[in-house]
Amino acid sequence: MLIKWFQLNSNEYSRLCRRPKPTNFALLEPSLLSVVDQRASEHPSTSTQYRSPSTMSLSMPVGEFFANSEIFVTGGSGVVGKALIEKLLRSCNVRRIYVLMRTRHHLGAEERLLKMRQAHIFNVLKKERPWELDKLVAISGDVSLPGLGLDQAAKELMSQVSFVYHCAATVRFDEPLRKALRLNVGGTLEAIRFAQTLKNLRMFMHVSTFFSNPYLECVEPKLYSSPMDWRTCLSLVDKIQDDALLDALTRKIIVGFPNTYTFTKNLAESLINDYREQLPVVVYRPSIVLFAVNDPSPGFAPSLMGAMGLFSLVGAGILKTVYLGKKIHLDITPQDIGIKSMLCYTQSAYNSYHQSDPPNNLLVFQCSSRTHISHTFTEMAEQMDKLSLWQAMPFQKSLLLPGCHYTDKRWLYQFLVFTKQIVPALLVDMLLRLCGRKPVVLGIVRKAYLTLEVMKPFMFNNYLSPGMTNAGYLIDYTRGTDFEMGTYEYPVTNELMVVKCQDMLRSIRHDLLKEDPHTLEQSKRILSIKLYFYQAIRLLLVYKVLKFLWIYCFT
């Protein structure tokens, strides 16, 4: 029962790991299609395969371009949203930033904004320009509601907004289709409709994902046709009230996509394209957002969610094995590079719309490390182990020794999960129960396991790309400014990778786990004791095995 609790169905596993072909609407059963009034063919999307312009133009320093402007941000409490807000406040002298906030955990919009202002990402801003945080205004609303849930007073307050950044989305890969459609597609539509009411709108930027077309081997900065019409998909939410029926339909609808996240992000791009002649719009596709290189601080780790959370579990000695292809390059976007390029692309898109010949195609920009980082993920991880980076920056909150074994053999992975993760977690939770405390470790192990399971499609498929769109131009144009991206000027070397990984571990320890830097030496001593204890157990096991063999073979 314990193993079944951890494992996915084998058929589901096989479906997730292959790189499937794009969806064909004709694959759906007629009995299921009858719930939809109008077919996608009756609402043809204007999406076609176009390449974004190969050149871009920035007419003024990026900070000056945004100076004295009012900006509306959805998803401002997320990783990308907070980083965007921090950079706008610290480097762009904006007039005001409105942040859409929904009531959550009995906290209203104002309370959530006050809590967000305490986030570690704003520490540098608080030291250099603390008054800038007063430019943040909480707007009560929800992207899943009609009209974003805005009241008339909020609409009047934001009448002078000139930039809209739509960052809100559910990023859960295994989100039920109904919720994913409502948030990622319906939310985008509501944000677009709000933007249509803004008389001074200069640019609407939709934050998508590099993996919105996961069936491709090479992803270019251009729009790809969606397999279904977004209107039809939204109609499914209204027409099918039975969750079980919609879940059954999901498996057929998203053929070609490993999860509802990538499917709905693909549809949202198609939606944006359908409004490109009515509004100045642009799509931005970052890959996996990880720690910052330099800004706001070297190695800044943004969140315990997603990939950074897995790194933290490795350092804490809880995650001991990862199922990963040996030659896989996980495409990543350093947080600061992603935000700086995002703001540069906003200005470039604005300039494109104000040329004598506006763009004929949807503007799409990407931030990808494929041409910049030659190391596979396994090589990077092995380098961290080889140079003992985990031992140099141990966490105070840890269980076993830090470090992880990466394998592409399923049987070995399952064996290591059981012996190195489940068994120790059971023992620790048993001790916690005996001490009258709530057991938590097995739950953490299970959550990490399931997170890696839904990530499998990206851990066994390589994605090629031209890299960051117009990287050379951006590097030259921003040199010596607050938006400098010199890190991307040359391929990452082993030395640079080691330094940045050290910075990342330091930030995880301080910013995410909230451990005092003064406890580092104590953590090193505790780790040394654990290491000696571990070596003693290994020697004892070797002795027992040899003794057994001697008795069995020679007596």
Image (cartoon, rainbow, N blue to C red):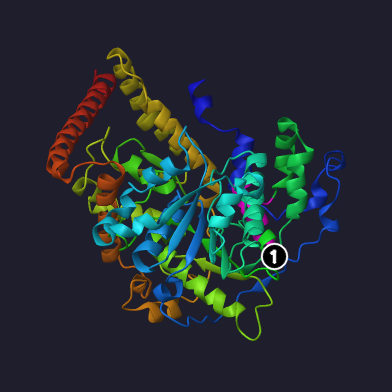
Stretch of the chain drawn in magenta? 256-270
Q: Which residue is mark 1?
A: 275
Residue at image location 45% in from the left, 53% down from the top: 137
For the C terminus, which image quadrant? top left
Q: Is residue 385 above or below residue 449?
A: below
* Amino acid type of the residue that numbered disc 1 sits on in the rendered structure: Tyr
In the rendered image of this protein, does residue 299 appear above or below residue 395? Answer: below
167 is within the stretch colored magenta? no
Residue 269 on the magenta span: yes
Q: Tag 1: Cα neighbours inside 10 Å, few (<14), some, or many (≥20)?
A: some
Q: Residue at x 45, y 34 (%)?
A: 447
Which residue is located at x 44 percent, y 46 percent? 306
Does residue 520 appear in this view? yes
Quadrant hosting residue 51: bottom right
With respect to residue 380, does 258 lie above or below? above
**Percent x, y of residue 266:** 64, 56
Most distant residue in the bottom direction: 356
Q: Is residue 254 above or below residue 370?
A: above
Residue 194 vs residue 555, the one in the foreground = 194
Q: Is residue 425 left or right of residue 179?
A: left
Name the dominant secondary structure of the magenta segment.
helix
- Residue 216 percent location from the top left of the image: 62, 61
